[in-house]
Image (spheres, helix red, strand yellow):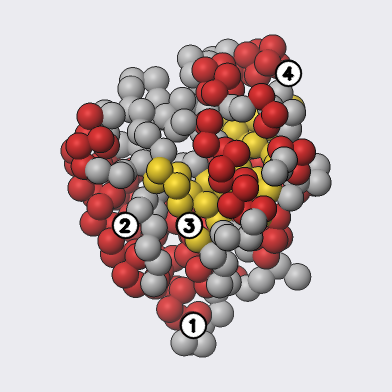
Amino acid sequence: MDVSHKTFIVMPAYNAELTLEKTYNDIPVAFRENVILVDDCSTDGTLSIANKLGLKVIAHNTNKGYGGNQKTCYDAALSSGAEIVIMLHPDYQYDARVVRIMAELIELKNCDVVLGNRIRTRGEALSGGMPKWKYFVNRFSTFFENFVLGQTLGDFHSGLRAYSREVLETIPYSRNSDDFTFDQEFLVQAVYFDFKLGDIPVPVRYFSEASSINFSRSLQYGFGALNAIFFYFVQKLHIYSDPRFLENG
């Protein structure tokens, strides 16, 4: 099955000069044709490396934040005709070799959304460099989100994600946060619109050059997730109409 021609890989980038080329080289050759990098006002050499690699580059004039960067990524992929879109951080934390499997699961319609699961076992995650506090916060929050949303994902906070075109055309992601909360809002929206979520194992790689939010930003991210879940149920009960849960039309 060749899904490479209909798959676009989008990279939301900020100061990724030390890891971008390694990440790109991990992508299977057949999937390198349609790679879009959106640079969020990097202050290093990210743009020059992206241009050297021959990527399609979109450069923000002002820093729009992690969520704002993704909005540009998905808009660009859809306007380019993508049928499957894979969001890959250019920080070399995720094993890009698995993008083919993710795309095929969507092509087979087994899933509408596929996440990379960084946590197969506690030992593997910690030996891969994941901070202990991040591991335990991830385990608790993933358990909670699975329970209240009726899912069985192994890692609700993964930054390696694949979406079908239908998902991106249905979910009003432009109404989401421009910050890190965007990711959690998106998954809650995907559940609300009855899309099928799944995941595949991907080894974790934590090192100094890989991007990672600190503890205080993680708390902010967590409260944002709780907000999205709260309004998910408010919307389900028809108490209040939240624009994040109104289908694009």
- Amino acid tagged 3: Gly
Q: Which residue is under mark 1?
A: 236
Of mark 1 and mark 4, the one earlier in the sequence is 4
Q: Position of residue 202 (x, y in %)?
A: 41, 38
Rounded to the nearest angstrom, the CA distance separating label 1 from label 4 is 45 Å
Q: In the image, is 69 to the left or to the right of 226?
A: right
- Amino acid tagged 4: Gly
Q: Residues within 10 Å of mark 4 (few under 14, many from 20)?
A: few
Observer able to see residue 65: no
Which tag is nearer the camera, tag 1 or tag 3?
3
Observer able to see residue 112: yes
Q: Position of residue 218 (x, y in %)?
A: 32, 46
- Up the image or down, 87 lies above or below 243; here it is above
Rounded to the nearest angstrom, the CA distance separating label 4 from label 2 is 37 Å
Q: Give the quarter of the figure containing the C terminus.
A: bottom right
Rounded to the nearest angstrom, the CA distance separating label 3 from label 4 is 32 Å
Which residue is found at the position 47% from the left and 87% from the top? 237
Q: Position of residue 39 (x, y in %)?
A: 62, 28
- Secondary element type, mark 1: helix
Which tag is nearer the camera, tag 3 or tag 4?
3
Contact, mark 3 vs mark 4 (Cβ under 8 Å): no
Q: Which residue is under mark 4?
A: 54
Viewer-proximal residue among 40 and 183: 183
Of mark 1 and mark 2, the one earlier in the sequence is 2
